[in-house]
Image (cartoon, grey):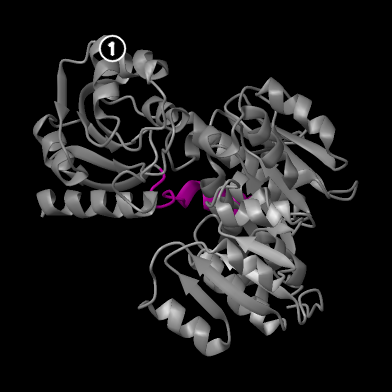
Amino acid sequence: MRTIATYQNQSVLVLGLGKSGVNATKLLLQLGAKVTVNDGQDQEDTPAVAELRALGATVITGSHPVALFEEGFHYLFKNPGIRYDNPMVAEAIKREIPVLTEPELAYEVSEADWVSVTGSNGKTTTTALIALMLNYQRAQGHAYAAGNIGIPLSEVAQKATAKDTMVTELSSFQLMGTTTVKPKVAVLTNIYEAHLDYHGTRENYVQAKMRIVQNQTASDYFVVNWDLPELRTLSQQTKAQVVPFSRLGTSEEGAYVKDGQLCFKGEVIMPVTDINVPGDHNVENALAALAAAKLMGQSNEAIIEVLTTFTGVKHRMQFVKEFAGRRFYNDSKATNMEATEVALKSFKQPIVLIAGGLDRGFTFEPLTDLLKAHVKAIILYGETKQLLAQTAKEAGIETIEIVDQLTEAVPAAYAASQEGDVILLSPACASWDQFKTFEERGDVYIDAVEQITE
C-alpha cells in the first residue's frame, strides 16, 4: 500500500455503514484522517459501530443531521447506492466539498495495476473470468477480484503490491465518485437502460459509465463492445488504445468470433462451443475477458482452461442443481429487463420463470415476445407482480400464478414444471421491495430450492 498524505489531519465524513463505508473508514483512519461516520438507520448496537468507535471514529446513526457540516469537513465519501439528492450529499455539494466513493480512495493507495470492468450487464462475470485467467499458473503476485463484485476495494488495496493486479468491477454509482482512477485496461461490456431513478437521465448514466476512461492515456487500453454502435461512438472519447470485442464479427481488430472460433487479432484460441456457461451473453463476456487477459500478457492456455471450466458467478445465471429432471438456475442479479431478456435467450428448454420485485415505474412490454417464445409458466411476486402478469397474459402464457413471497414462488414453480424444464429465477426487477440486496434474494431462492429437493 502506498502511504499518502492527502487525508492527514483532514476532517472526512463517511456516509453509509455498508462494507465499503466501514472499510473506507478504517483506511482513512490509518491515513491520519479525522473521520465521522453517518448512517440514516439506527445501527447503534452493531459490531461495526463498536469497532469503528474503538478505532477513533465518531459514529452517528439514526438520522442525517445536516448541522454536522458546521464542523468543516474537507471530504465526503459516500456509499455508492446513496443518491446525490440525499440531504447530506446535497449539503456537501452546496458547500463545494468533494463527494467521492470508495474506489477513489482505494486507487490512491493502490500499488497494483488496475483492470476495471463496467457495463449494464455482464460486468461481474467478466471480472471473475479476468481474475481467474490472470491467476492461472501465475509466477508472481495475485489478481484480486474486488469492488462491485462484493469485496471492498479499500480492503484489497491495502494488501495488493506492485506484483499484483486489481481486477475491479465498477458500477455507475461508484464511478460517479471518482476523479483519479486510471485503469491500465478498462472494459465496457454494454450499456442499456438502467438506474434512471438514480441518474435521472440516460445521458447521465452513460456519462457515469464513461468515467472509467477519463484518465486513461495512450499507454492504456479500452476494451469495448463493438456490436453496439453507441459504444463505437463513445470509444472516441478515450485517449487509450481501443480494443474492440465482437460476437457478431463486426471487427477483427481485437477479440471476435469467426467460423465458430474465439479469436484475438487473427489468432484462433478455442471453439465457441467449448465455453462452459450457456448463452450469447456469455460469449460476449468471454470475448471481453480474453481481450483483457491477452492485453495483460496472459497465455491462450490460461484462457482456454478458464473458459472451459468456469461454472458461473453466484446469482448470475448460476446453476443451482438438477432434480427430477428439472434444472434450477439463480439469476437474481437480473435487476432489469435487459438482463432477463439475456437469460431467457440462453435456454432452448421450456422455462418456468420466477420474476418480480421493486416497482420503478416501468412496464414490461419489451419482454412479451421472449416470454411467448421461451416461457411455459410464470410465477410472480413482489411490487411488480400485477404488471408482469399483464405482460404474461399478452404473451399468451396459460399458467400465471401470483404469490406474496419468493419462498412461495419456488414450490409453485416446481409444481408447474415437468421433466426437461428449466426453473429460472430472473426477476427483471431490483430486489429492494423485499430484500436488502440481490445476493440476499438469490440466497433465499437457493435455500427454497434446497427445501423442496432434499
Viewer-proximal residue, 391 or 203?
203
Residue 123, how many percent across, how many down? 56, 45
Quadrant showing the C terminus: bottom left
Residue at 59 percent of width and 79 percent of height: 26
Q: Quadrant of residue 10?
A: bottom right
Magenta extent:
299-316
Say what amino acid the circle numbered 1 marks.
Answer: Ala
Task: Assess whether residue 11 is covered by the magenta stretch.
Answer: no
Q: Residue furthest bottom?
A: 54
Residue 320 visible to an observer of this rendering: yes
In the image, residue 76 sits, relative to residue 448, either above or below, namely: below
Residue 377, how many percent across, how many down? 19, 24
Viewer-proximal residue, 411 or 84?
84
Quadrant showing the N terminus: bottom right
Q: Dot 1 lies on which element? A: loop
Residue 420 as seen in the image, left or right of residue 244: left
Q: How many marks?
A: 1
Q: Residue beneath label 1, please? A: 395
